[in-house]
Amino acid sequence: MKIFVVDDEPIALSSLQRILRRRGYRDVEVCDSAPAAAAMIKARDFDVVFVDLLMPEMDGLQLLEAVKPFKPYTEFIMLTAVDDVNTAVRALRLGAYDYLVKPVENERLLLTLEHAYERRGLLTGLAGAGARQDRMLSNAFAAIVTQCPRMKELLLFAQTMARSGNPVLITGDSGTGKELLAQAIHQAGPEPEGPFVAVNVASVTDSLFESQFFGHAKGAFTGAANSYPGYFEQADGGTLFLDEIGELPKNLQVKFLRVLEEKKVTRLGDPQQISVNVRIVSATNLDLDKACQTGAFRLDLMYRLKSVHLHLPPLRERDGDIALLADHFLHKACQRHGKELSGFTPEAMAHLQQQEYPGNIRELAQKVENAVLLAPGPFITLHEFGQRSVAPVFSFARKLCTLKEDTEAHTAYVLRQTKGDRRQAAKILGVTLRHLQRKIAEMKKQPGWLNILDDI
């Protein structure tokens, strides 16, 4: 068992480490800085983490919230002198296994440690070997294309949490696939046959909020020719997905919170309350904690929405997924547009894998879609991405090249990467500057290289 202890007091660290080692737990690491501990937890695989609540720079709850989405199978035990029910409830909602108030009896502490480790074993056992072969992921998650270990771990955790029917908050940059994950959670939840109603909160104006979410009776206001069931009623027996929940106006948040607490809505113009059974899945690319600190978002509403927190990583952090997704989008686009393309040239794929993708998966999908429309076939080349190949006539997808041609292509590639710096290019190529200059002069005599080298 790998145990990690985070506490800003050296005496507390050494004391707990000594107790654990006396009981046979040899793999125990300690850290007295919460920010440093957060980085270590993300980079390593600990089984159980003990976290002090009151620490400078970052408290225990902030640490838990920062790392739990990245390490869903690591169990966290809060250790604190603060005996406060609301704090304990928040810790549990953020994913802590237990909340122990100091001083803690050794036997209680060790028993909690064992139970936490057993729970981790249960969750990882559900994933187990299936995490490698996707055998444990249900068809509900089939639309999410990934081979990234971090994403697979996240999806297995999402599947486990989906069965509870509790509210889920999905965070992540724009274009990371939050709605697709919300749909998967709905399908993997207790009522997959129920409706899935998606609403962009930012698109609902203040004046129409109550009518859109709660509905209205016929004649409730000018233009209300018919009764209208709001989003909560439409999603009854299913899932209401609230995209961009961070944009919900402050003056409307209390009305929204009341519905979540009472599970009843009242249509405008109709005093009768209507009971609704709705699972809430929310998504945002904003930092709700900061919004709560500035007063832009209600803390109690965030707790209601954040029973389970899932954080989607940006595309650039999903190992191996760019090529996989690009191929997936290519085949989808070919089907839509009735085209037959065999794939990407090595240069084109290398170009895709080198991009940063601030728009994430949505941006990659659009790039591939445009390339499919432009490509004459049979392969998508750099040209379709608005780029010029350093050796277009020698694309490996079209024909094999001679050793001389390969040397020339490599020389041009290095010159392009060094932005025409002959001295730096010569050093990289392992030749003298004079040798490189002679090589460039020889290549410029060939029509295929003249324009390319002139642009470098």
Image: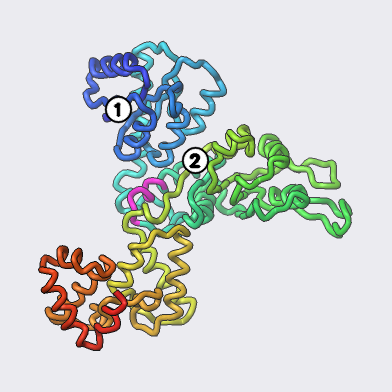
Find disc 2 in the rendering and name its residue. Answer: 309
Question: Is the residue 177 above or below the residue 305 in the image?
Answer: below
Q: Residues within 10 Å of mark 2 (few under 14, many from 20)?
A: many
Write the start and end of the magenta stretch as one range: 147-154
Q: Quadrant of the N terminus?
A: top left
Find disc 1 in the rendering and name its residue. Answer: 3
Q: Residues within 10 Å of mark 1 (few under 14, many from 20)?
A: many
Q: Main secondary structure of the magenta part?
A: helix
* Residue at image location 60% in from the left, 45% down from the top: 246
Q: Nearer the viewer, residue 445 or 141?
A: 445
The kind of residue tagged 1 is Ile
Q: Quadrant of the C terminus?
A: bottom left
Residue 430 appears left or right of 410: left
* Residue at image location 51% in from the left, 15% down from the top: 83
Question: Is the residue 365 above or below the residue 396 in the image?
Answer: above
Residue 11 appears left or right of 266: left
User: Quadrant of residue 250 in the image?
Assistant: top right
State how far apart marks 1 and 2 are (Cα): 23 Å
* Residue at image location 53% in from the left, 42% down from the top: 287
